[in-house]
Image (cartoon, rainbow, N blue to C red):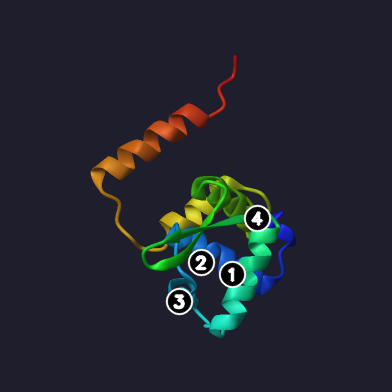
Amino acid sequence: MIDALPRREREVFETLCRLEAGTTAEVRSALSDPLSDSAVRTMLSRLEAKGLVERTSGPDGVRFSPVQETETVAVSALRRVIDTFFAGSAASAATALLGMGERLTPEEASALEALIDERVETKS
């Protein structure tokens, strides 16, 4: 369903996922290309009507949060990027990510090595 969202709705939704929860003003200020306050409210209401966002009242006003867990949304978004830019190859995407220049901590490297060992096909 997220793939079918218009570009700006998807951007508002992904921003809300990054924040995990937020008011209209918080979502608006976190957007890379800010919209008007009323436009953000409208998009959050549309996302709520589509069942992707829920609203709760709190001491700081109305807060919105994604209905799905952020990890589920992240996996869907990452799958779309891998399919679009890396011809469906997770290995190519991982190679590109690792080639971006950030150094891995020993713990991160060990975790990646363990996951790679777990996922490597073995001949039986």
- Which residue type does callout 4 highlight? Arg
Residue on which disc 1 sits = 11
Proximity of marks 1 and 3: CB atoms separated by less than 8 Å: no
- Cα–Cα span, label 1 and label 3: 15 Å
**Mark 1 or 3 closer to N-term?**
1
Task: Mark 2: give few (<14), some (14-19) or many (20+) Cα within 10 Å.
Answer: many
**Mark 3 or 2 closer to N-term?**
2
User: On the image, which quarter does residue 107 sit in?
Assistant: top left
- Which residue type does callout 1 highlight? Glu
Residue on which disc 4 sits = 80
- Cα–Cα span, label 3 and label 2: 12 Å
Secondary element type, mark 1? helix
**Left or right: 65 as drawn, with respect to 77:** left
Residue on which disc 2 sits = 15
- Residue located 50% across and 46% down the image: 71
- Which residue type does callout 3 highlight? Ala
- Residue located 31% across and 37% down the image: 110
- Cα–Cα span, label 2 and label 1: 6 Å
Relative vertical location of residue 25 with respect to residue 44 in this rendering, above or below? below
- Residue located 52% across and 83% down the image: 34
Proximity of marks 1 and 4: CB atoms separated by less than 8 Å: no
Closer to the camera: disc 3 or disc 4?
Answer: 3
User: On the image, which quarter does residue 50 sit in?
Assistant: bottom right
**Mark 2 or 4 closer to N-term?**
2
* Residue 16, position as x, y percentages in the image: 50, 63
